[in-house]
Amino acid sequence: MSGISTHVLDTATGKPASGVQVRLERQDPAGKWSSLRSGQTDQDGRCRQLLPEGATLAPGVYRLTFDTSRYFAACGVEGFYPVVEVTFEVRDGESQFHIPLLLSPHGYTTYRGS
């Protein structure tokens, strides 16, 4: 089974960031990005599957884009980063990726989760 998932935690509030728009893209060999799927974090701050249904996770460069400006506006907070982009590489034999985002109005961090 192939998959890409994410989880967004608002570290300023200590709660999951629900309602964050997330877009998954893949880069072709010429460097052009193509959109694979978009989603929105649920009440638990998760997008459980961003890879399109039936798709196989092929080796290559992928990018997750988080629309943090809308999220912070909905929270009544002024954020510094209007968008967070996380670019990562999938290698042969890899099939499952979970990429959490720890978010605050003036900073963020990410890592490869399990």
Image (tube, rainbow, N blue to C red):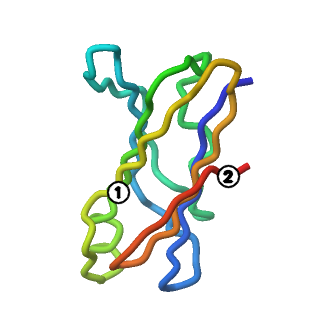
Residue 8 versus residue 94 in the image, above or below: below
Residue in view at x 50 percent, y 75 percent? 10
Counting labels gives 2
Q: Earlier in the sequence, mark 2 or mark 1?
A: 1
Residue visible at 57% across and 70% down?
A: 16
Q: Tell me which corner region of the image, top left, top right, bottom left or bottom right, holds residue 97.
A: top right
- Which residue is painted at 34% across and 14% down in the image? 29
At numbered mark 1, what does the secondary structure look like: helix, strand or loop? strand
Viewer-side residue, 73 vs 34: 34
Q: Position of residue 95 (x, y in %)?
A: 68, 27
| Dot 2 crowding, Cα within 10 Å, few <14, some 14–19, many 20+ | few
Q: Marks 2 and 1, how far apart in space?
A: 17 Å
Give the residue type at disc 2: Gly
Q: Which residue is mark 1?
A: 84
Q: Which residue is mark 2?
A: 113
Please give left or right for residue 58 compared with residue 29 in the image.
right
